[in-house]
Image (cartoon, grey):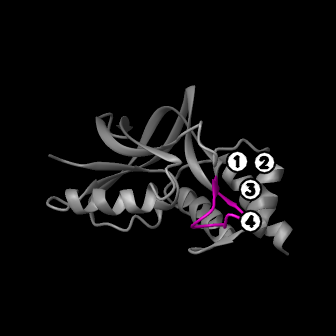
Amino acid sequence: MTMWVFGYGSLLWNPGFETDDTQVGVLNDYARSFCMRSIHHRGTSEHPGLVLALDEQHGASCEGVALRVRAGDEAQTLVYLRERELISSAYLERILPVILNTGETIQAVTYVIDPDHVQYCHLELEEQANVISRAVGDRGPNTEYLHNTASHLVKIGIEDPDLNWLSKRVVTLCS
C-alpha cells in the first residue's frame, strides 16, 4: 500500500527518508503554527524553543507537501518518523486527507499537536520571534529551523505571511 507523509515544517527540507514523489497539497481544518515548545530539537527544558505544529482549527487550511514514501520503505520510515516526531508525545500521529494540487485526495501520515500536552502554547507573533531568536537545542538554533522552513515554503511557491514576518523579525532581533 502506498504511504504518504504530510510535511509542513522541517519535513519540507529535511524529511530523513527516501521519497519517490513530492507534491504540494492542502490539509483542511488545521493551521501551521509555532504552537509547540521544543525542549529537545530546537530548545531545552530550561530554555524551550518553538517548532511548528498543526493546530486543529475548523475552517483553517495548511498548504504543505505530500511525500510519497519509496515502495518497500514504509515500515522503516514509520519507525524513523515515530522516533523523530513522537519524542515527547506532544504530537499525535494521524492519518488525514490531503488534497493534492492535481485534485486527488490521498491519506497521509500527519503529526498534529496535542492541545492538552504541556508543550502546547499559543503566543503572539512578537513573543514567538523573541523565543525563536534565543533558543538552541540538540539539532541547532531555533533560528535555523525557522529560516529553513520559511525559505523552503517560498521556494515551492507556498505563501505563509506569518512565517515570512517571523523570519524577517528574527533577523532584526539577532542583528
| Disc 4 packing (10 Å; few <14; some 14–19; many ≥20) | some
Q: Residue 89 or 33: which is nearer the viewer?
A: 89
| Disc 1 packing (10 Å; few <14; some 14–19; many ≥20) | few
Nearest to viewer (mark 4 / mark 2):
4
Q: CA distance from mark 4 to mark 3?
A: 19 Å
Pointer 2 and pointer 1: residues touching (CB < 8 Å)? Answer: yes
Earlier sequence position, callout 2 versus callout 3: 2
Q: Which residue is mark 1?
A: 162
Pointer 2 and pointer 3: residues touching (CB < 8 Å)? Answer: yes
Q: Is residue 39 left or right of residue 8?
A: right
* 173 w.r.t. 159: above or below: below
**Residues rendered magenta in the picture:** 37-50
Residue type at tag 1: Asp
Q: Which residue is mark 2?
A: 125
Q: Which residue is mark 3?
A: 166
- Picture quarter containing residue 101? top left
Residue 124 in the image, given as x and y percentages of width and height: 79, 44
Q: CA distance from mark 2 to mark 1?
A: 8 Å
Residue 95 in the image, given as x and y percentages of width and height: 34, 38
